[in-house]
Image (tube, rainbow, N blue to C red):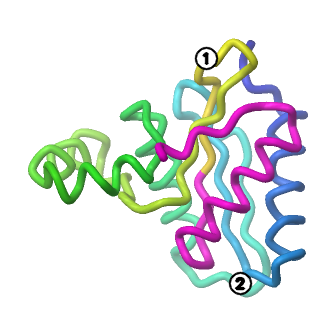
Amino acid sequence: MPLSLAAAQTILAATLSEARSKAMNPLAIVILDERGAVKLSACEDGTSLKRGDIARGKAMGAISLGVGSRAIARMTAERPHFIAAATHAIGGALIPVPGGVLIRDSGNAVIGSIGVSGDTSDNDEIAAMAGIAAAGLKGDPGA
């Protein structure tokens, strides 16, 4: 099942709702489909200029490497040359910190990813996971 626009809209709304309920800083959110194409993108009022690019880099890293960005952060410490090469291979769009989460369907297939940026990386990930759960899908942060 591909990631539908309706599911992406639910993820976006629920991610923002979670952030507001926890008084997080303004967020930028990018949701990619299974091919890495942008399905939905939004920046709250008050985000800094490049937050959207950072959110996209978290989502792109996750979908490109097939693991959540928390695992990519660990890889950066363990295999920095690999992450540098992977970043180059995907055009520089890889942000190796938590907040990039794979979106999986009920059969565990990857159907997209979400990148969130604006608060701490841990809070970005918390908001993303809540959004994915609200759509009845599974989040895989690479824990």
Q: Secondary structure at mark 2?
A: loop
Which residue, as the protein is rendered here, is positioned at the far left? 81
On residue 25, the disc is 2
* Residue contact between numbered discs 2 and 1, judged by CB atoms under 8 Å: no
* Numbered label attached to residue 1: none
Which residue is located at x 64 percent, y 24 percent? Answer: 111
Q: Is residue 85 magenta?
A: no
3D distance between C-alphas at marks 2 and 1: 31 Å
> Looking at the figure, which quarter contains the N terminus?
top right
Residue under the image location 73 percent in, 46 percent down: 40
- Side of 129 where 22 appears, left or right: right
- The mark nearer the N terminus, 2 or 1, is 2
Residue 41 falls in image quadrant: bottom right
Judging by the rendered image, the residue that carries numbered circle 1 is 109
Question: Picture coordinates of residue 6 (x, y %)?
Answer: 90, 34
Q: Secondary structure at mark 1?
A: loop
- Residue 135 covered by magenta stretch: yes
Three-letter residue code for mark 2 = Asn
Position in image of residue 65 (x %, y %): 36, 34
Query: Which span is picked out in magenta?
Result: 115-143
Residue at 51%, 64% (x, y): give it. Answer: 53
Q: Nearer the viewer, residue 8 or 132?
A: 132
Left or right of 88? Residue 134 is right
Identify which amino acid the numbered label 1 is placed on: Ala
Q: Position of residue 142 (x, y in %)?
A: 47, 43
